[in-house]
Amino acid sequence: RFQERHGLPVDSVVGSATLAALNVPIESRIRQIELNLERYRWLPSDFGKRYILVNLPDYQLYAYDDGKEGFAMRVIVGDEYGNATPVFADSMTYLVFRPQWDMPRRILVDEVIPKVRNNIYYLAEHGYEVIDTARNEVVSDPSTIDWSDLDTANIHFRVRQKASTGNALGNVKFMFPNQYSIYLHDTPADHLFDRQERTLSHGCVRVEDPVKLAMYILKDEGDWTEDKIREAMQPADSAEVEPVPVDLKEPVPVYLVYLTAFVRDGVLHFREDPYRKDARAMGRMGKAAQLERTECEELEELAGG
């Protein structure tokens, strides 16, 4: 029960992670509760009847309908080093089956161009195509570009990954346009959901069960059955396929939050602090008040300790 409450593997073994959680002082947990109560204070008092909530430290997505939780699924969020998923709220207005991936410039410069310099066939091997931005045309032979002497501060092309089973976005993306260019999407790397800590993306949120999420989103959007959704998500690698956008008649609110202490089914849960937001915020909150031992015991009991 302790492991479940702390987001740890439930194996009844006191390993290093469980031992570390057991050794967190009650005073620190009280401070954690105080900090998260402050975060709650800035959230809406009413999220609405139908919405999606992603708690980043929990690595979970929760879908609500008629004010009640319908289902939950594991997610992968941004890497803590330079790719942290931001906290914000917006409304999902459309989704795209068989999406193409327009590679962000930072990934192109930092990760892909060095690989192309080592292997000129890298782009073709991963289903990438180069688009001349001036003419908006596909460059038929990317080897004509002088990759070794490329001015990365002045690139006149973009790189796009075609729809395929290996596409970085998987077979569907869920769009809620925002200033951060963050969205939810499928992934071909399903094995990563088995990891306990899932700060592994470039910032967007990868979802464990895109079919279930699509069924939830499209429930009142026409005859989108599970079979039709799976058919729409199935790319044909042997032929050119176009993305299939689907506009939503009713936008779905999406909340990306950062809560390391929260209540589920009447039980208080704690999570680790992957982006070290707790540590920085507690430093701004000032010193903790000195509590008498009896007060600590009472608060520990209330916290389910």
Image (cartoon, rainbow, N blue to C red):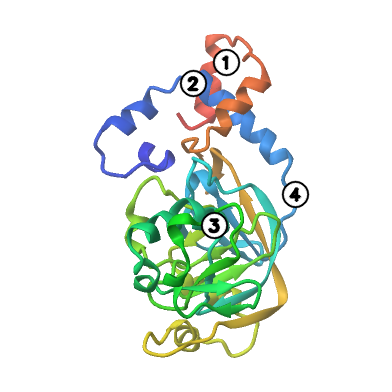
Q: Position of residue 60 (x, y in %)?
A: 49, 53
Q: Where is residue 138 in the image (x, y as percent from the top left)?
A: 54, 79
Residue picked out by circle 1: 295
Number of the front mark, 2 or 1? 2
Does residue 266 appear in the picture of this structure? no
Q: Position of residue 33 (x, y in %)?
A: 59, 30
Residue picked out by circle 3: 204
Which residue is rendered at x = 39% and y = 45% of the image?
197
**Spatial CA span between label 2 and label 3:** 34 Å
**Spatial CA span between label 3 and label 4:** 23 Å
- What amino acid does circle 1 point to? Glu
Which residue is rendered at x = 36% and y = 27% of the image?
20
Query: Which numbered disc, 3 or 1, marks the residue that appears first in the sequence?
Result: 3
Depth check, front residue: 36 or 202: 202
Query: Which numbered disc, 2 or 4, marks the residue that appears first in the sequence?
Result: 2
Query: Which numbered disc, 3 or 4, marks the residue that appears first in the sequence?
Result: 4
